[in-house]
Image: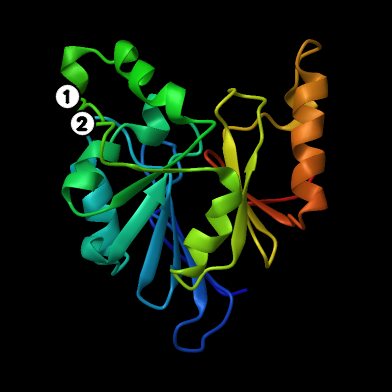
Amino acid sequence: MPIKRDAGIARHASSSAPGARSIVNVGYRSTNFWVVSAGRSRFLVDLGWPGMFGALEANLKRMDIPLGEISHGYATHYHMDHAGAAQDLKRAGMRLVVFDVQAPFVAPMAKWMKPEMHYTEITLDDNTVIPLAEGRALLRTLGIDGEFLHTPGHSDDSVSLVLDDGAAFTGDLTWPTLAGEGEIDVITRSWELLRSKGAKQVYAGHGPIREMP
């Protein structure tokens, strides 16, 4: 799998053929934001920090990814460092995908925002809210094969994406060896679910790409 690195931003491609699936990290401030592409069809996994949409836009430009080609995106969970720029992305033309298990968590995120963060609050009536079971069909419209899974552990609204080739986007799902005594059962079940669905490499919300634990 070829890897190109540029100032901490990584590009992973499954093939050099035109239209091949690729994964590009456009993150900043220690948080990874992943663009999954099939040709010019783009899907964004995790959605930036509040008040820092410009940094995300700049990283997209550096990696030659037109913002206008990101048609859909989702947050692995609704914490400020993973969904803080969601509304700014919507204003730029991205369709926000919210899964049914996440919907109650979108609005409450605003209570953690301070004025100096310049957070743009997420509107609720114009999102694509769907059950997890419909996620595969949505991805297929973008030429991407994968499945969304409810993986609680770090948060109750955690939703991971597992592509059919084994790439797993897990957000902040707690690494098994770091689980506390009161959460080990929930976290273990989430990782076992990911493994059962073919996850091989972990593209987490923070840190490097890892092999499945």
Tell me the amino acid under the disc marked 2.
Gly
Which residue is denoted by mark 2 in the rendering? 51
> Relative to 133, does residue 3 appear above or below in the rendering?
below
- Identify the secondary structure beneath mark 2: loop
Name the quarter where the N terminus is drawn. bottom right
Tell me the amino acid under the disc marked 1.
His
Q: Residues within 10 Å of mark 2 (few under 14, many from 20)?
A: some
> Relative to 101, does residue 59 appear above or below in the rendering?
below
Image coordinates of residue 192 in percent, x first then y, are: 82, 41
- Identify the secondary structure beneath mark 1: loop
Q: Is residue 108 left or right of residue 92?
A: right
Q: Residue at x 77, y 58 (%)?
A: 198
Mark 1 and mark 2 lie on one chain; the one further toward the N terminus is: 2
Image coordinates of residue 164 in percent, x first then y, are: 67, 65
> Relative to 67, does residue 178 appear above or below in the rendering?
above
Q: Residue at x 57, y 59 (%)?
A: 136
Q: Are marks 1 and 2 in contact (CB under 8 Å)?
A: yes
Name the quarter where the C terminus is drawn. top right
Tag shown at residue 92: none
Q: Residue at x 60, y 43 (%)?
A: 160
Q: Is residue 77 left or right of residue 87?
A: right
Gap in angstroms between the C-alphas marked 1 and 2: 5 Å
Image coordinates of residue 128 in percent, x first then y, are: 37, 46
Q: Residue at x 61, y 49 (%)?
A: 133
Q: Is residue 60 left or right of residue 187?
A: left
Q: Is residue 170 among what the camera can see?
A: no
Which residue is denoted by mark 1 in the rendering? 118
